[in-house]
């Protein structure tokens, strides 16, 4: 693919008040001024690899073939953690080897990673605290110029993977679930899907109670608009997972629940 017209996305926990994001973009554009840069987000909670992995997993497949995704949430910067470049489907990825690509790897059988060891591609000198600028950004820039991943370093057969929680049936009437992420609106994105709960199946009239943040939730709606102001309820979200939401408010704030929190589901027998 020609380096003209390539897209590079950026996802970080750097926020927007400092120079970090701009510096990364400058490095990439210095290597390839013909690319288009797209911000996925820079508002990932600081050092929250799980939220970053979930967000990247939801966003990357919406982009055209050949897109390069640069994801830097890197609490291990400067340590012995590896840096990696990967391909999956028709997309490319540059990231620390800390599990941030876990959802991508889970969704793509042809996921293939390489450890980045070819340091002549790095920006010099390499800061021990800003690999986003000095390691990952230049690698994304070179990939946009069609440098093959094999030139960056050896194959990495077992990159780090996060343990993505899956619903567990503890008893016939009890499911243990979890919050995968919290969005900007304070909606709690769970790891449950509509098919996991009989309340969304007209042929299964069993009642369901969901337990989150020491609160019992019994309202299940199809859309946000069906809820009453201030009501906390469950709705099928655009991610494919069920969300715990609050009409005209933040469920996360009211329930005091964060990413990774346990969710219980009680089914009537």
Image: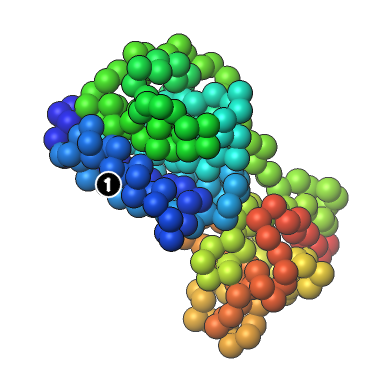
Identify the image quadrant of residue 67: top left
Q: Quadrant of the N terminus?
A: top left
Q: Is residue 266 above or below residue 147?
A: below
Residue at position x 40%, y 15% in the image:
118
- Residue 6 shows in the view: no
Residue at the spot 60% in from the left edge and 34% down from the top edge: 76
The residue labelled by disc 1 is: 37
As drawn, is 129 to the left or to the right of 3? right
How many callouts does the rendering have? 1
Whether residue 225 is visible here, answered yes or no, is: yes
Pinpoint residue 223: horizontal percent, then vertical percent.
50, 74
Q: Secondary structure at mark 1?
A: strand
Q: Nearer the viewer, residue 7 or 222?
A: 7
Q: Is residue 74 above or below residue 150?
A: below
| Residue depicted at 22% across the width and 27% down the height | 145
Q: Is residue 237 left or right of residue 218?
A: left
Quadrant of the snapshot with the C terminus = bottom right
Q: Position of residue 53 (x, y in %)?
A: 53, 43
């Amino acid at each position: 693919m020609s380096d003209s017209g390539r897209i590079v996305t950026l996802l970080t926990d750097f926020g927007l008040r400092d120079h970090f994001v701009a510096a990364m973009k400058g490095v990439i554009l210095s290597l390839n001024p013909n690319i288009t840069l797209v911000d996925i987000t820079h508002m990932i909670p600081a050092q929250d690899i799980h939220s970053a992995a979930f967000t990247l997993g939801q966003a990357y497949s919406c982009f055209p073939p050949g897109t390069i995704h640069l994801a830097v949430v890197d609490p291990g910067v400067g340590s012995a953690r590896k840096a990696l470049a990967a391909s999956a489907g028709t997309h490319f990825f540059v990231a620390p080897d800390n599990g941030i690509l876990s959802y991508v790897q889970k969704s793509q059988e042809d996921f293939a990673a390489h450890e980045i060891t070819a340091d002549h591609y790095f920006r010099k000198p390499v800061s021990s605290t800003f690999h986003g600028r000095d390691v990952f950004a230049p690698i994304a820039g070179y990939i946009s110029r069609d440098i093959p991943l094999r030139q960056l370093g050896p194959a990495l057969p077992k990159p780090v993977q996060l343990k993505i929680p899956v619903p567990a049936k503890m008893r016939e009437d009890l499911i243990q679930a979890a919050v995968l992420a919290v969005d900007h609106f304070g909606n709690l994105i769970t790891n449950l899907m509509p098919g996991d709960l009989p309340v969304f199946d007209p042929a299964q009239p069993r009642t369901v109670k969901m337990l989150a943040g020491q609160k019992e939730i019994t309202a299940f709606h199809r859309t946000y608009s069906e809820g009453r102001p201030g009501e906390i309820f469950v709705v099928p979200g655009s991610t494919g997972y069920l969300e715990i939401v609050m009409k005209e408010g933040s469920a996360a704030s009211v329930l005091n629940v964060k990413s990774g929190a346990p969710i219980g589901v009680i089914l009537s027998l």
